[in-house]
Amino acid sequence: MTIMTEMTPDAVMRRYRRARDRRAAWEPLWQECFDFALPQRETALGRTTGASRKTDRLFDGTAPDAVEQLAASLLAQLTPPWARWFGLMPGTQVDEARRPDLSHKLETAATVLQSHFDRSNFAVEMHQCYLDLVTAGTASLMFEAAPPGEPSAFRFTAVPLCQVAFEEDSSGRLDTTFRTSRLTRAQIVERFPKARLPDALKPRKPDDGEEPSADVLEALIPAKGGFDYMALIDPGAGAAADREATVLKTGRFERSPFINFRWLKAPGEIYGRSPVMKTLPDIKTANKVVELVLKNASIAVTGIWQADDDGVLNPSNIRLTPGTIIPKAVGSAGLRPLEAPGRFDLSQVVLQDLRTAIRRALLADRLGQVEGPRMTATEVLERVAEISRLLGATFGRLQSELLTPLVTRGLSILIRRGEVPALRIDGQVIDLEYKSPLARHQAQQDVQATLAFLDGLARLGPQALAIVDVPQAAQALAAAFGVPPRILKPADTGPAAPPLPDGGEGAAGGGLAALASLLGAGAPPAPPAGAA
């Protein structure tokens, strides 16, 4: 990092306070979302208070369960742990003669990058970010370079929403990030060893009480060709705000270490909106219905009793235990139960409808585990098509705001460490390919269409099959399935296909059938027309 000279601490503090004031309008909504859908997660309005009981207001667990399922599904569909969810490939401007060698180098670089993701804490922190994303609509992941000697070059931190405030650029990207965190003196010294601390953070003796602490503000503001960074001690509000902020560190980043992403956003808004926000009325209603049902159930179990004031029966002296004898006056009805006015059957109907709506809004019935008999290939493709239709816009936003910055930031760190050559993903020479399970499902749809076309040609005879370049077809299918390029022969060096004999499928037809059979082990082809 190079020293930054353009920003001043006062300008950074003023800009941060404006961003924090804009965030304040969202905090009550975030608080409700976390209270009813994810009570165990740190809320948007403050820090955790130890082992406090955060579920006292929660009576229905449908929303928390659906939120955790959706977050787990996003992790498995977009960034699956210990699986390749991205790839590097030659772009459109690369000559065919250079493609094999460049593909091999890019595959090696992608393998190194993936290994660092796997050895880091990426899966743990990414899951926390997905929980924030589903609940509050906005999440922030801090992507830092780990110190030398660590198992991985990467270190991730899921930043709670109560610590960050954002600004948006003209293109709608969350490019400016302010993060404030409470750190002790020891933590500040460890993170900023060369900083000069104010007198308020002087070391104390063990008997002088708790270790001093301060609010540390980290600002990352885009500048020409990168991002300017400044870390300083927030003087606070009131009279302390007049004191000059103490600068701990300044510098510059080529890629932002803060990756901020949203579920979806409304025009004119900076922060995202979540599926929990959409279904929050149903969540609160279901929670209230369950609370009333439990109260009604306690009345039904323990009962409410009524008695005539006949001067004989004293309720204070009565214990409802087996064998109890209750005195009553002549002509008095004595002690009798009061019939409960509530209807359990009606409340259960209303509750069932609410729970179904909540699970549908949070996609628990679409992205969750399949229950029942094994689905056919056609049913799998239909389900994937429905998921793509429902979440196409959201996944597109996550690709641009989350997945691409993850890869580019990771490459930037590894290039500085000398573990991969200098690579720049520009879409022309080097392109980024998504290989997550969701992208794989879309590729399988393309494979099904290709295999159906080849099957139709095979039924037309050898003259129709003659238009197919079998090696190129195999290369295209291998690319669709994500087969590593190193196990494939270049298309121009393979032996020439033998001529097709008259009648039947011939050698090419047999090769296509074998290819279809081999690929069918991973994704069975669609049945031919007219088949049972």
Image (tube, rainbow, N blue to C red):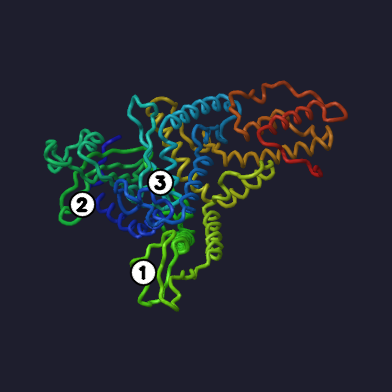
Residue 516: x %, y % from top left: 72, 32
Q: Nearer the viewer, residue 151 or 500?
A: 151
**Amino acid type, label 3:** Asn
Which dot marks residue 236?
Answer: 2
Residue 417: x %, y % from top left: 38, 27
Q: Read off the residue under disc 1.
A: 315
| Secondary structure under the numbered disc 1 in the rendered image | helix
Q: Residues within 10 Å of mark 1 (few under 14, many from 20)?
A: few
Residue 264: x %, y % from top left: 47, 53
Residue 44: x %, y % from top left: 35, 52
**Amino acid type, label 2:** Gly
Q: Residues within 10 Å of mark 2 (few under 14, many from 20)?
A: some
Residue at 41% in and 29% down: 414
Q: Which comes sooner in the sequence, label 3 or label 2?
A: 2
Q: CA distance from mark 2 to mark 1?
A: 61 Å
Q: CA distance from mark 3 to mark 1?
A: 64 Å
Q: Does residue 152 sit above or below 351 in this rendering?
A: above
Q: Nearer the viewer, residue 323 or 262?
A: 323
Q: Read off the residue under disc 3.
A: 260
Q: Are marks 2 and 1 in contact (CB under 8 Å)?
A: no
| Secondary structure under the numbered disc 3 in the rendered image | strand
Q: Which comes sooner in the sequence, label 2 or label 1?
A: 2
Q: Which comes sooner in the sequence, label 3 or label 1?
A: 3
Q: Are marks 3 and 2 in contact (CB under 8 Å)?
A: no
Residue reaching furthest to the front: 330
